[in-house]
Structures are given as structure tokens and as C-alpha cells.
Image: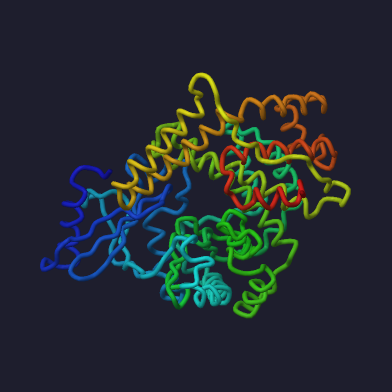
Amino acid sequence: MTDEGFEEKLAAYCCRTYGTDGRLEDVRRLSGGASMESWAFAYGGEEFVLRRLPTGLSADDDGLRGVPLDAQADIIELAHAAGVTAPRVRGRLSAEDGLGDGFIMTKAEGETLPHKILGNPDYAEAERKLTGQCARELAAIHRIPLKSLPASLEYFSPAELIRVQQDKYHEIGGQIPIYDAVFHWLNRNAPDASDKYLVHGDFRMGNLMIDQNGLSAVLDWELARIGDPVQDLAYLCTPSWRFGHYEKVAGGFDSAESFFEAYADASGMAVDPDRFRFWLIYSTLWWGIACMVMGQIWRSHGDRSLERTVIGRRVSEVEIDLLLLLEEILPEDARTPLAWSVPATEIASGETSYGELLTALGEWNSTQVQSGLKGHDKFQSRVAGNALGIARRQAEWGPRFRDAATARLGAIGCDHGQLCAGLSNGDIAITSPAIWDHLRLSALERLSIDQPKYAGLSVALNKWSPS
């Protein structure tokens, strides 16, 4: 849905900006965009994209938009001038336009959905080029002089970034044991604050337009800031941004080593592995906190879109990712096998169960509702299907998982809150076998409910519960 008169106002803006001989056509909401709206449209034979704040949000909401929209447009123009494959900014909205905060760009051609690109034979040649292209784009971004950037861009040291995320986590009321343990690790391993460059902040598959020749546009600059360039490299390698190709650390398309080599060739700067590990673990946790923020925005009535609540449940994906990352630096004796598998679906009898009701709703949504929808509405229906699946698995498996976690904590000798506090301040060590087993089992239980198809779940099961 849009606010009243959206298309009429957009047509009036285009008439004033691009000439009176055009016609507004093919206005459509692009899929995704939980933290920012994107609208494609054509006018006068040209194709454009409008970026604006979602209806119901303001520029100072505590969300994920980061850089003000006007500053985003400034940065995109600077990047384009510096040789970055960024779209051209073609217009900026004002209050008089009645369309909210935003700006308009030339529409880049290609595909952004990772599942349509990675592993697709039609994009095989493009995928082979991505390592070198991404390295060159990032090197070009990092070379943009700081003195040319908008004054609103902020710099936070690694220690300050950790504190910002930890404050958000506590403000929301987070109590996820592995998150608390990772905050403790990050605070003990934060690098120095010497490196200061422009960083894109959200450089990943999904925010890169890809055509058959490779990368055709770097999109979504709302998280740009001044920081450590290695953070951009690590962010692309965050497990959630590998989109099912978990073994290919660099964006789901290549190894980290090949990506490092390409970046060193393009920038003249070698990548320090310890610095990269810090930023990879930080970026993974950052996404977990971002998921919590999404849910909090919905909870506080900032934006009641269904997508925010489903993204809010992705915190358990990050639990698995963090455990796998930390396991790489734990002692060998901590890597013991577990006896666990995803529960089998039970055959119901007697009265209709809550799980069966939710199954029926999901089947109705997928067979009766989605078939009549297109574009963003169809995307939202799929999101609704995901939400129903989560609720069904929680109804069927949640009680037994809760009882199992309570029993494990009883054997350890603390409750959930005490475990979180102890891991956060370092009084409880994750290297304790009972603690490490509980963290892994809890993450497996939660993720099997929230997203059983997440690639990290099968990776974790292969490592921890080998058949």
C-alpha cells in the first residue's frame, strides 16, 4: 500500500523535473526493502528508481537507515564520479513534493536476488568475475577522499561500535547467551582505531546489481560511514550474506583467500587475518542485533510490516553462525560431537492440533492466495507463509525444546538470565563442555523452528552430529 495520491504526486514531480512531454508508467514496489522503500517507474521513455523512507517512519527513528537520504544522494554522486559503478542520481524530493524523504536514480539493469544469481548457469560467467569486480569497487570506494564527504558522516572506533550495538541489545531486552559471549570476545579483541576511510557499510549480494557481464551497479548506500575498510570486506563474507552457499565465504561466490588477493591487487593493501576475523564476527553479530531492531520497530508501531517480524526471528541463524565462527578459535577438546537431529513430524490423532491448523493456513496461503498475486504482494504472501511455518514448528516442537533447555541449565546450576550475565562479564567460560554443549543445542533447537532450510543448520549438524 502507498499513501493517498502517491502516483499523482510522483507524476507531478516528474513533470516538473523531467519535462511535460512524458508519461508516468509501470509504477511498482520492488521486493524486499524492510528498512527502505524502493519504487521502480518509467517516465518519458526512461526508467527510474525512487528510494524513500517507508510510510510511518521518520528520518530520526531508531532503525537501520543510518545516513540521511540527502547525504546518501551526495555519497552516490561522489562514488559515481570516482569511478564506482553506482547509479546516477536524477532528482531529490522536497517537502513540497508531498512524497516524503527520498531521491530518484537511473534504474540499473540486471538482477539483485542472490538465489537467482548464485549457482545459476545463466550467470556463471558473471559469477566468475565477481571476486575481481567486488574487490575493485571496494578499493575505489575506499579511495574517495574523506574531505569530500558530507559532514554528517560519522566515525566510530571499533570499541565504540561494540558499545552502540551492546546498548541496543540491552535496550531491546536481549538475552541470547551466545550473543553475550560474543560481546565479551569482541570487547577483548577490538583492533586499534587507526584506519579511517569511506566504507559502504552494506556491500553484499542483494545490494549488488548483476547482469550477464557481472556487477552493473552498487546499490543501497544508507549505511555508509567513515571506518575500517576491512569491515567492508568482512561484511560481504558474513554467513547470512552467502545465501545458501555457505562454503564460499566471499559472498557465496568465492573463497576468502581469493577475495583478499584480489583486494590487495586493487587497493595495494594486504588484509590482516586477525583484523578480518574481528570484523567478520562483529558483522555477524551486528546482523543479529539488526534483526532484533527490526522486531522492535514493529513492536513499537514504527512500521507494522509483516516482514519485520519474520526478520526478527532470524536471530537464531546468527546464533549458529557465531558458534561456528568461535569454534574455529576454540581448543580442539571443545569440539565434541552431539547426539541431535531435527525432529521428525509426528502423526497426529484425536482432535485437530494447533500445528495442523497452522499447516492448513500455510497451504491455503500458498495454493489459493499466492497464485493471484504479483510483485510485492506475492513477496509478502511468501513472507506470511514463512511466518506460519515458524508458528507451526513452535507449536509442535517448542514445549519439548523448552523442557530440554531447562534440564540442561539445571545440570549446569544456573538459570537463563544468570548464564547470559556470566557469559557477558566473563565469569562463565564458553570452553566449559557443559556450557558449549548447551549453547550449541539451544541454537540447533531454535533454528530448526525459525528457519530449518538455513544453510548454516546443515553445516552445523554435519560438524556437531555426524552420522
Q: Residue 450: x, y in percent? A: 56, 39
- Find residue 297 and report its image quarter: top left
Considering every residue shown, the one lying at the far top of the view is 351
Residue at (72, 57) in percent of width and height: 191
Foreground residue among 264 and 311: 311
Name the colour scheme.
rainbow
Q: Position of residue 87 (x, y in %)?
A: 38, 69
Name the residue nearer the viewer: 185 or 111.
Answer: 111
Residue 9 visible within the image? yes
- Quarter of the image that includes the N terminus: top left
- In this view, the residue in front, 353 or 165, is 353
Q: Nearer the viewer, residue 86 or 25?
A: 25
Which of the 4 quarters of the picture holds residue 93? Answer: bottom left
Q: Looking at the image, which residue is at 28% across and 46% down?
A: 372
Q: Is residue 143 visible?
A: no
Quadrant housing residue 129:
bottom right
What is the residue that sits farthest to the left in this orientation?
A: 21
Residue 163: percent from left, percent from top = 64, 44
Left or right: 80, with 411 as reference point: left
Would you place residue 35 above or below residue 131 in this image? above
Q: Position of residue 285 (x, y in %)?
A: 63, 47
